[in-house]
Image (tube, rainbow, N blue to C red):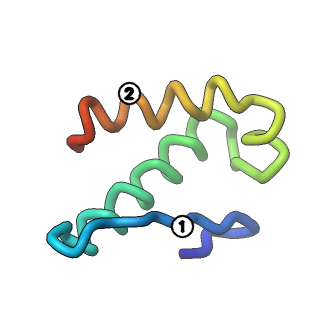
Amino acid sequence: RRYASLFFIAGTDVDDNELLTLEIIHRYVEVLDKWFLNVCELDIIFNFQQAYMIIDELLIGGEL
Protein backbone atom coordinates (compact mmCIF):
# COMPACT_ATOMS: atom_id res chain seq x y z
CA ARG A 1 0.00 0.00 0.00
CA ARG A 2 1.25 3.49 -0.77
CA TYR A 3 1.30 6.37 1.72
CA ALA A 4 2.51 9.67 0.22
CA SER A 5 5.96 8.77 -1.16
CA LEU A 6 6.31 5.58 0.90
CA PHE A 7 5.38 2.03 -0.07
CA PHE A 8 4.72 -0.65 2.55
CA ILE A 9 4.69 -4.36 1.81
CA ALA A 10 3.59 -7.03 4.28
CA GLY A 11 3.79 -10.78 3.90
CA THR A 12 1.13 -12.84 5.67
CA ASP A 13 0.18 -16.46 6.13
CA VAL A 14 -2.87 -17.87 4.40
CA ASP A 15 -4.76 -17.92 7.72
CA ASP A 16 -3.97 -14.28 8.63
CA ASN A 17 -6.54 -11.51 8.31
CA GLU A 18 -5.51 -9.17 5.48
CA LEU A 19 -7.63 -6.31 6.82
CA LEU A 20 -5.81 -6.46 10.15
CA THR A 21 -2.51 -6.26 8.29
CA LEU A 22 -3.69 -3.15 6.44
CA GLU A 23 -4.83 -1.63 9.74
CA ILE A 24 -1.41 -2.28 11.32
CA ILE A 25 0.33 -0.58 8.39
CA HIS A 26 -2.06 2.36 8.61
CA ARG A 27 -1.47 2.79 12.35
CA TYR A 28 2.30 2.47 11.87
CA VAL A 29 2.26 5.26 9.27
CA GLU A 30 0.15 7.45 11.57
CA VAL A 31 2.63 6.98 14.43
CA LEU A 32 5.59 7.63 12.12
CA ASP A 33 3.88 10.80 10.91
CA LYS A 34 3.49 12.05 14.47
CA TRP A 35 7.03 11.03 15.47
CA PHE A 36 8.87 12.49 12.47
CA LEU A 37 6.39 15.29 11.66
CA ASN A 38 5.36 14.30 8.13
CA VAL A 39 7.49 11.19 7.59
CA CYS A 40 9.43 10.63 4.38
CA GLU A 41 11.79 7.96 3.07
CA LEU A 42 14.89 9.73 4.41
CA ASP A 43 13.46 9.79 7.94
CA ILE A 44 13.25 6.01 7.92
CA ILE A 45 16.66 5.57 6.27
CA PHE A 46 18.57 7.84 8.65
CA ASN A 47 16.55 6.97 11.78
CA PHE A 48 16.11 3.25 11.28
CA GLN A 49 16.56 2.49 15.01
CA GLN A 50 13.70 4.82 15.92
CA ALA A 51 11.44 3.45 13.17
CA TYR A 52 12.22 -0.09 14.34
CA MET A 53 11.54 0.87 17.97
CA ILE A 54 8.13 2.22 16.94
CA ILE A 55 7.11 -0.94 15.08
CA ASP A 56 8.46 -3.03 17.96
CA GLU A 57 6.29 -1.09 20.44
CA LEU A 58 3.29 -1.32 18.11
CA LEU A 59 3.64 -5.09 17.66
CA ILE A 60 4.38 -6.75 20.98
CA GLY A 61 4.98 -10.46 20.40
CA GLY A 62 3.44 -10.31 16.93
CA GLU A 63 0.13 -8.98 18.23
CA LEU A 64 -1.44 -5.56 17.75
Q: Residue at x 61, y 68 (%)?
A: 3
Residue 27 x, y percent position in the rendering: 40, 52
Q: Nearer the viewer, residue 61 or 57?
A: 61
Residue flagged by tag 2: what amino acid is it? Glu
Q: Residue at x 68, y 36 (%)?
A: 36
The correct choice, above or below, for 23 with respect to 55 in the image is below
Q: Is residue 16 left or right of residue 54?
A: left
Residue flagged by tag 1: what amino acid is it? Ile
Quadrant for the C terminus in the image: top left
Residue 2 x, y percent position in the rendering: 61, 74
Q: Nearer the viewer, residue 54 or 36?
A: 54
Task: Place residue 19 in its image quadrant.
Answer: bottom left
Which disc, if any, is residue 57?
2
Q: Residue at x 54, y 75 (%)?
A: 1
Local crowd size for mark 1, using a 10 Å CA cut-off: few (<14), some (14–19), many (≥20): few
Question: How many numbered circles does the render carry?
Answer: 2
Local crowd size for mark 2, using a 10 Å CA cut-off: few (<14), some (14–19), many (≥20): few
Which disc, if any, is residue 62?
none
Q: Is residue 25 left or right of residue 48?
A: left
Q: Nearer the viewer, residue 16 or 45?
A: 16
Residue 38 x, y percent position in the rendering: 70, 49
State the residue position of label 1.
9
The correct choice, above or below, for 47 with respect to 8 in the image is above
Secondary structure state at the residue bearing disc 2: helix
Q: Nearer the viewer, residue 14 or 23?
A: 14
The correct choice, above or below, for 11 with respect to 48 in the image is below
CA gap, disc 2 and disc 1:
19 Å
Secondary structure state at the residue bearing disc 1: loop
Q: Residue at x 46, y 37 (%)?
A: 55
